[in-house]
Image: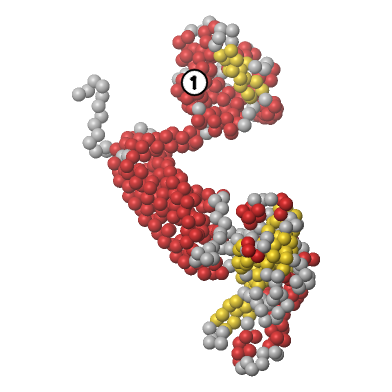
Amino acid sequence: MPKPNSLQGSLDLLVLKILSRRPRLHGYAIMSAIENMSGEVLRVEEGSLYPALHRMEEAGWISAQWITKDSGKRARMYQLTVAGKKQLGAEESRWQAMTSAVNRVLRTA
Amino acid sequence: MSLWSRITNVVRGSRLNREIDEELEAHIEAAIEQGRDPAEARRALGSKLRHREGSRDARLIVWLDSLRADAIFGWRQLAKTKVSSAAAILSLALALGACTSAFRLIDALLLRPLPVANPERIYDLSRQGFGPDGKPTSFDGWAYPDFQLIRAGVKNQGELIAVSYAEAVDLTYKSDQEMERAYLQYVSGWMFSTLRINPALGRVFTENDDLKPGGHPYAVLSHDYWTHRFGQDPEVIGHTFRMGNDLYEIVGVVEAPFIGTEPGTMVDIFVPTMMNPAVTRKDSTWHRTLLMLKPGAALEPMRQKLDATSRAFEEERAKGFLGMRKEDIDHYLNQRVLLEPAASGVSDLQSETRRPLAILGVLVALVLLIACANVANLMTAQASARAREMAVRVSIGGGRWRLAQLVMVQSAWLALLAAAVGGLFAWWSGPFAVSMINPPDNPARLLLPADWRVLGFGVALALGVTLLFGLIPALRVSSVNPAPLKGARIRTRSGA
């Protein structure tokens, strides 16, 4: 269940964005990428990452594939689908609309 | 694609769990490679079970998964009480089978629409009046000259088709020593185009095959007859047979399902009405008249018009009734034309068996109800024996709907198995019942297709039956109280 101050809501957007820049990442890499690129400000709740990934996979926004690593262990790599690109666009503009609305309130109030 | 993967994930639930676990394991490994403490990484990820729940729900259809689990559990419950389950299934199967075969019969004879275009717009013309004794009478036979008049009168609103009462005739393809019987029907040449019946081979009749009395010695075979008499030989076109003094030439075969307009009689050979010796006689009523109403045409004005034309014809004819009393003639003339829906065709067998079949239907429905009551009793008894199990389930958080579903699924198993056995029974007994209907010299021949109608009926029946005997035990179970559990003791590992 979503906890306060978790990235719930924007997590989808971040995952889609990361995957649009760097195709074929596994869950841990997605998480690290979000943390690194945000300058360690955003922390992904590890417990909610995989349910979110699986949900997005079922929604058809991302697809997953098992690959075998050099160590012989398997890893599940995710990449963006065409539907995911569309969804990313929608989420991005939603996010822009929301932040600009919040900014307006901060400026005027 | 996504829905499909969610459905398939239901049947490979354990593999799904393994995959989720493997992915989480890979995550922790990656974390350790980054130099994180293994215990801390595991803690951060959280409980495996919680992940499984969250991810599973996303990756499969939850209700389908619970249904699968209930189906397996219900099956085990049935297998536990083999004897009583078998008894329940057998008694249900007999009742379901009887119902299904009764339906097959009633459907084939009374309900199933003719395999033609727009059967819902077909009506049978009859005349209703009062006999000399004052009793109401009704007869659907017509004389051909009368038919020609009334057909011309309503040409704009509908098409009338003459079809003779199908009869068994003697004919021969070779010499007179090799006579054989076949069912023959005289039909209007334009019947085929009006009902949109196409040839499977050769051609069917048109209006031009039905113009001059005695002038069109052609025949069209039914697909069934072509199959069992000629082995579907395509060379049959051009063959001739002799019936009475006339030599007929076979010009075509109609498409498979059409076997005439009389349920109970499968017509072998169609010939044009003009070949009937009585076609010019005003006093011989030898054929039925079917009406194909044009789209948008109203029925009652049509009926009145038919009534008027038919009456004018009979009045003209009555002038020649010498030596009859005036009131008898009036009785005769005061008949009303009736239009009765004939979407499923019209035959004497239909009118003769309608009542008996209705009674049969009620009887088998009662048998089914009795069987349901028995099985419901059995289920209720079993359910109360499981009261404690159910109370435990409620106590540990089983939802009431889930419990009801558990019991309903078990009932569905019973109904399903019974329907399968009953279906076999119906499949065997249907044709057997038909062979008993008529005297042996003129057996009823009825198409008894076991198609989606029968299957649909069987499935609907099984579902209905499940509700009938499963609902009450299910509701009972779902109202079980979690506490107090009579005689249940909680034991702890240390306690004594």
Residue A54 screen position, x and y as percent: 56, 25
Camera-nearest residue between A45 and A26: A26
Q: Is residue B204 left or right of residue B66?
A: right
Q: Could you tell me which secondary element the residue under label 1 belongs to?
A: helix
Residue B167 screen position, x and y as percent: 61, 68
Quarter of the rendering occupied by the C terminus of chain B: top left
Q: Pointer 1 indicates a residue of which chain? A: B
Asked whether the viewer can see residue B214, the reply is yes
Q: Residue at x 27, y 37 (%)?
A: B485
Camera-nearest residue between A70 and B323: B323
The image shows a total of numbered marks equal to 1
Q: Would you place residue B413 above or below residue A81 in this image?
A: below
Residue A75 screen position, x and y as percent: 57, 15
Q: Would you place residue B285 above or below residue B102 in this image?
A: below
Residue at numbered disc 1? B18
Camera-nearest residue between A48 and B418: B418
Q: Residue at x 56, y 84 (%)?
A: B131
The local crowd at label 1, few if under 14, some if 14 to 19, many if 20 or more residues have their Cα within 10 Å, is few
Q: Amino acid at mark 1?
A: Arg
Q: Which residue is most to the left?
A: B496
Q: Residue at x 56, y 50 (%)?
A: B451
Q: Would you place residue B293 above or below residue B86 in this image?
A: below
Query: Which image quadrant for residue B34?
Result: top right
Asked whether the viewer can see residue B189, the reply is no
Q: Residue at x 72, y 86 (%)?
A: B316
Q: Would you place residue A19 above or below residue B204 in this image?
A: above
Query: Which image quadrant for residue B132?
Result: bottom right
Camera-nearest residue between B71 and B360: B360
**Which colour scheme appears in the figure?**
secondary structure
Quarter of the rendering occupied by the N terminus of chain B: top right
Residue B154 screen position, x and y as percent: 74, 73
